[in-house]
Image: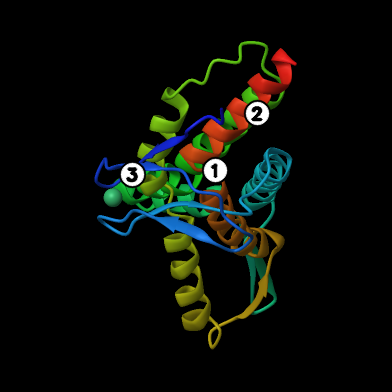
C-alpha cells in the first residue's frame, strides 16, 4: 500500500494531501492560496555550492575596496569596514554600529548558519533534523540589509560623480552579486527543502 503523505500549510495550518507535481507546477493551499511546494526545487549540492559562493562574495566584499576617489592628484580607497570606521571617527557611533550589524555581522552569521545547515545534512553523522538553525536564520534575515547598503552606495556614487573621478572596486561588484545570489539562496533554503534533503539522507543511510 502506498504511503499517504500529508502537508501542513505554513500560513493557515490546514492539513492537505501531498500531490505529485510535474516540472514547473506548484501546489497551493486550497484555503489561503499560500504556495505549499513546487516541483523542480533545488538539490542539496546546488544549494551548498550557492552557499559557498555567498561566502566567497562576502569575503571579497569585506576585504577589497568598494570604490576609489580620485580628486586633485589624490586617490583614496574605501572599504566597507573603512567606511564604518570613518563614521565612528566622525562621532556617528550609532550609525557605525548599525552599518556593522546589518552589513557585516548579520550577513556573516546568516551565511555561516546556511553552510552549517547544509553541511550538517550533507556530511553530518547525527541525522536528526534540528530546527534551531532554521529559527535563528529566519530571525536573522530581516537584519541582513546589504541591499539597503547597496542603494546608499548608488546614491553616493551619483552625488559624487561630478566632484571626483570614481573607480568602482571589486567589493562593489561582489556586493551586487551577493544580493542576487542571496535572493536565490533564500528561495532554495526553505524549511520544506531542508526536511526533504534530511529525509533523503536518512533514507540513503538506512539502505
Ligand atoms: Zn493555508
Q: Is residue 201 left or right of residue 152?
A: right
Question: Circle 1 is placed at which residue position?
Answer: 189
State the separation of the CA atoms marked 2 and 1: 15 Å
Disc 3: residue Cβ within 8 A of ligand 1's nearest atom? yes
Q: Nearer the viewer, residue 160 or 140?
A: 140
Can residue 17 be spotted in the picture?
A: yes
Q: Residue at x 31, y 59 (%)?
A: 33
Q: Where residue 9 is drawn, which disc sits there?
A: 3
Q: Nearer the viewer, residue 90 or 138?
A: 138
Given residues 58 and 79, the one toward you in this image is: 58
Name the residue carrying label 2: 200
Q: Is residue 98 shown above or below 5?
A: below
Measure how far apart labels 3 and 1 are at the Cα level.
17 Å
Residue lying farthest to the front in this orientation: 1
Spatial CA span between label 3 and label 2: 21 Å
**Residue 39, percent from left and from top:** 59, 54
First in sequence: mark 3 vs mark 2: 3
Instruction: Residue 164: name its quadrant.
Output: bottom right
Task: Say what secondary structure mark 1 lies in.
Answer: loop
Count neighbours of disc 2 (C-alpha within 10 A) and say few if under 14, some if 14 to 19, many if 20 or more.
Answer: few
* Residue ID at (39%, 31%): 135
Q: In this rendering, which labeled residue sits more in front, label 3 or label 1? A: 3
51, 201: nearer the viewer: 201
Q: Position of residue 50 (x, y in %)?
A: 68, 47
User: What residue do we see at 70% from left, 76% from top?
Assistant: 73
**Helix or strand or loop: what does disc 2 sit on?**
helix
Asked if residue 39 is positioned above or below residue 172 in the image, the reply reads above
Amino acid at each position: 500500500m502506498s504511503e499517504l503523505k500529508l502537508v501542513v500549510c505554513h500560513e493557515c495550518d490546514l492539513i492537505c494531501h501531498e500531490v505529485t507535481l510535474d516540472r514547473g507546477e506548484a501546489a497551493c493551499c486550497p484555503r489561503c492560496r499560500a504556495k505549499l511546494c513546487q516541483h523542480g526545487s533545488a538539490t542539496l549540492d546546488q544549494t551548498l555550492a550557492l552557499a559557498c559562493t555567498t561566502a566567497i562574495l562576502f569575503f571579497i566584499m569585506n576585504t577589497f575596496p568598494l570604490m576609489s576617489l580620485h580628486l586633485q592628484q589624490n586617490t583614496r580607497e574605501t572599504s566597507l569596514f573603512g567606511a564604518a570606521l570613518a563614521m565612528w571617527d566622525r562621532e556617528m557611533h550609532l550609525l557605525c554600529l548599525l552599518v556593522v550589524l546589518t552589513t557585516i555581522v548579520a550577513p556573516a552569521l546568516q551565511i555561516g548558519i546556511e553552510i552549517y545547515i547544509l553541511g550538517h545534512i550533507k556530511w553530518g553523522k547525527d541525522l536528526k533534523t534540528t530546527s534551531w538553525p532554521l529559527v535563528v536564520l529566519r530571525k536573522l534575515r530581516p537584519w541582513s540589509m546589504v541591499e539597503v547598503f547597496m542603494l546608499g552606495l548608488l546614491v553616493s556614487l551619483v552625488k559624487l560623480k561630478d566632484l571626483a573621478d570614481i573607480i568602482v572596486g571589486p567589493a562593489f561588484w561582489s556586493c551586487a552579486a551577493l544580493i542576487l545570489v542571496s535572493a536565490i539562496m533564500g528561495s532554495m533554503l526553505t524549511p520544506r527543502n531542508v526536511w526533504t534533503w534530511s529525509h533523503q539522507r536518512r533514507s540513503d543511510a538506512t539502505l
